[in-house]
Image: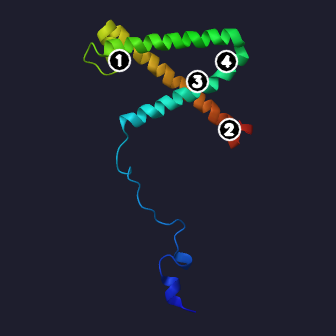
Amino acid sequence: MNTSATNKVGVGAAAPLLPKLKPLPTEGRGASVAGAVFNVSTSIIGAGIMSIPATLKVLGVIPAFVSIVMVAVLADVSFEFIMRFTNCGESKTYAGVMYESFGRVGSVAVQICVMVSTFGCLIIYLIIIGKHTIFNDTL
């Protein structure tokens, strides 16, 4: 038996399970703003698309359509508001725009809305994870 062949790296018991790959060109760089925006927008769009069938089932076709149109109008108005007032002032954040427009009350209000929305998403994800775990029967 040739022992020199079994002592080489990559042969026999010393063989790596996965081959070494060249590092990706993106490794070592931080996340970009465009990547973060894309990630958040796909999450929002995905959650919205997944909620439409449930809305139709619970409300019915006409009330669901009316609620979807109302949400679309509110989104359009809020987007118009943000775009109009972001260019007027020096702020680059939601809280800053609201502070310049409505003072401290507006800034605190938008921060509370963001916190409640984030907390709600956290609760939804925890419910989904809880329904799909192996320990669901023991709880």
Disc 1 and disc 2: Cα gap in Å?
37 Å
Residue of label 1? 95
Query: Helix, strand, or loop for circle 2?
Result: loop
Q: Quadrant of the N terminus?
A: bottom right
Q: Residue at x 37, y 14 (%)?
A: 82
Which numbered circle lies on residue 55? 4
Graded by Cα atoms within 10 Å as few (under 14), some (14 to 19) or many (20 or more), the crowding at tag 2 reads few
Graded by Cα atoms within 10 Å as few (under 14), some (14 to 19) or many (20 or more), the crowding at tag 4 reads some
| Residue type marked 2 | His
Q: Identify the image quadrant of residue 103.
A: top left
N-terminal label among 1 and 2? 1
N-terminal label among 4 and 1? 4
Which residue is at the front of the view, 52 or 110? 52
| Residue type marked 1 | Ala
Disc 4 and disc 1: Cα gap in Å?
31 Å
Query: Helix, strand, or loop for circle 4?
Result: helix
**Nearer the observer, disc 2 or disc 4?**
4
Is 13 located above or below residue 76 in the figure?
Answer: below
**Nearer the observer, disc 4 or disc 1?**
4
Disc 2 and disc 3: Cα gap in Å?
21 Å
State left or right for residue 103 relative to residue 117. left
N-terminal label among 2 and 4? 4
Disc 3 and disc 4: Cα gap in Å?
10 Å
User: Are dots 3 and 1 in contact, CB under 8 Å?
Assistant: no
Is 100 located above or below residue 6 in the figure?
Answer: above
Which residue is at the front of the view, 63 or 91? 63
Residue of label 2? 132
| Residue type marked 3 | Gly
N-terminal label among 2 and 3? 3
Which numbered circle lies on residue 48? 3
